[in-house]
Image: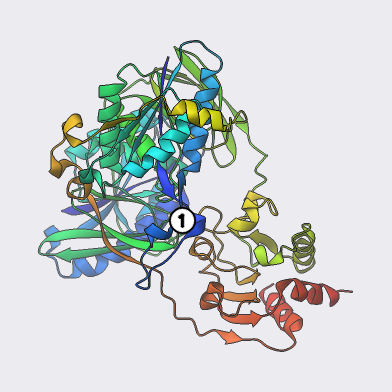
Amino acid sequence: MEIVVCVKQVPDVDDIKWTKENNLDRSQMLSKINPHDEWALDWALNIKSKFKDVNVNVISMGPSQAKDTLNYCLAKGATRAILLSDKAFGGSDTIVTSKILARAIKKYIPDFDYVITGLFAQDGDTAQVPVSLAQLLDVIDVIGVNEIHNADKNCAIVSQKLADVINIFEISTPCLLAVREKCNNSYIARIEDYVRAQNTPIEEYNITDLGFEKNEVGVLGSPTTVYKAFRPQINKNTQEIKDDLARVVLDFIVKAK
Amino acid sequence: MNKIIVYCDVNFEQKSLENVSYEIISKAYDLIKDINENLSDDMKYVIEAVALCDEISPQYIKKAFQAGAGRFVLIKDKSLENFSQCVFSKCFCEYFNQNPSPIILFGATQIGRIVAPRITTILNTGLVADCTGLDIAYEEGKIKLLATRPTFGSELMATILSKTNPQCATIRPKTFIAKFDKDIAGQLFEFHPTSYEETRIKFLRRILDNSSDAVDFSNAKIVLSGGFGLNDGKDKKYFLRLEQLANLVGAKVGASRKVVDFGLMPQSAQIGQTGSTTTADVYVAFGISGAIQHICGMKNCKTIIAINTDENAEIFKYADYKIVEDAKALIDDMLATFI
């Protein structure tokens, strides 16, 4: 059984640094595996633990630093790691990112049974890539999976958590599952795992390997473009309350009732 | 005739439309009103509401006209009785390819988020997710969608343009207000798509999920919210006191993301981009620093009172009333008035 897990290296949003010009200072920020993607990997490894002959292929698009994230995945138990890296890929929006991932999966893991992804990335928070990827791979998907109950070569039973209901589906392979919750069997990699991971080289592919033209990917190929980015400005005439605080606040509350 | 399509979110049990659809129709109507004034009649834009279902009750179609839709298209087929992302996106695209428009707007609901990227991928165009601001510009005979969304853990706002048509965006519910004040003699059309059958996935059953115990902020008049400033490093004492205070004054209790991440308050209480949105009359922020992620969920409250020991806290920029004080002490003082 072939499982593909898509992972993204993201800056730690709890550690945001700004430049004087109010831009993000990425050089000062730490990177880590997108938390939802780690859950996706844990679910895949959970399936691997139940059957013989399961390969867990992790795939990531990003700069060469993303190898850290892929090594982390190998240490946790992934069997193969693929990095899609090219300067031309920089600035790809969601549909172009999905096209790059889809082409790589079709070329390097053509017999996949499952693609498992996190629901969204912490830095972009669009939740579009899993859906778009499923469409481009021409497979059925379940978006927002909170539990994979059973997954074999032919089909899986999964729950999808929505606002106030849980839907349970039987889904045939090949398919894509975008997970939104942790897997209880999460394996924490030890030092010897990192040592073992060093024996698995990370495969690297670029724009030529995937057969894209420069104007099909990155900023050039992306249909959406950031027109301006800003930190929200507000002009409130804020008044300071200095005395009799408890009573003044309670007065506001009582008036609103 | 030119048009802007609003993909309507359907409540399949009630055969009705979700409120977010009316919110988007109302906003789109307001945005094209000024553009239409300078256009000849045959070039004017109308809002076209498109819904996929086996039927929609007439009163909900009428509401779409009152919100600002000039056309209502019901894509109708037995296979559209229940939601399925592949079938719905195929049927919509079949209609769209015969009746294109330069802009499609979707509600950023659970279904909207699942179906919109499928549709835009089929149409090979861009999609801006989860917008909290919308504008439409008209330049040299071309209509342009300017969609603004919070990004990067909501610390930054980005206005995004699409280079390709259709220009598409999903819009967060409650971003705009639905106004049913138009007197439009709207037209209803039916479209019968090719019937598809989805055999790759089988729906087994549905369980009502009570585990989330969601707090309903939609009608809350008063919200008292707790931030990390209420954490005393030992226990949840001040969060419990905040709840006690809320019970006494008849308020709902909210929380910041950090407090939820630390397990001090349940996720259901979280206010902000990844939590709930409130437009309460009075919002009191106890010990909340004011990350944009949080601000997104409460900035439209009528009166905002913020309490924080740091006089430079971000939250004060958004507050009508500022109190530089330990929020824990203020909660104790407020509770003391009830003894």
Vertical position of residue A121 compared to residue A14: above or below? above
Identify the residue at the far right of this view.
Answer: B339
Q: Can you see residue B66? A: no
Left/right of residue B297 with respect to residue B288 in the rendered view: left
Left/right of residue B280 with respect to residue B317 in the rendered view: right
The residue positioned 42% from the left and 47% from the top of the image is: A10
Left/right of residue B248 with respect to residue B76 in the rendered view: right
Vertical position of residue B60 compared to residue B154: above or below? above
Q: What residue did someone put label 1 on?
A: B153
Point out residue A167 in the picture as x, y percentages from the top left corner: 55, 29
Which is more toward the observer, A149 or B125? A149
The residue positioned 52% from the left and 75% from the top of the image is: B318
Q: In which quarter of the image is residue B46?
A: bottom left
The residue positioned 24% from the left and 43% from the top of the image is: A89
Point out residue B217 in the picture as x, y percentages from the top left corner: 61, 58
Which is more toward the observer, B41 or A37? A37
Left/right of residue A57 with respect to residue A95 in the rendered view: right
Point out residue B162 in the picture as x, y percentages from the top left corner: 22, 53
Q: What residue type is labelled 1?
A: Gly
Which is more toward the observer, B145 or A79? A79
Q: Can you see residue B8? A: yes
User: Alpha-carbon neighbours of circle 1 within 10 Å: few (<14), some, or many (≥20)?
Assistant: many
SS at badge 1: loop
Q: In which quarter of the image is residue B121?
A: top left
Point out residue B39 in the picture as x, y percentages from the top left corner: 14, 66
User: Numbered disc 1: what chain?
Assistant: B
Vertical position of residue A121 compared to residue A244: above or below? above
Count of marks overlaid on the render = 1
The residue positioned 58% from the left and 69% from the top of the image is: B289
Which is more toward the observer, A157 or A54? A54
The quadrant of the rendering that contains the C terminus of chain B is bottom right
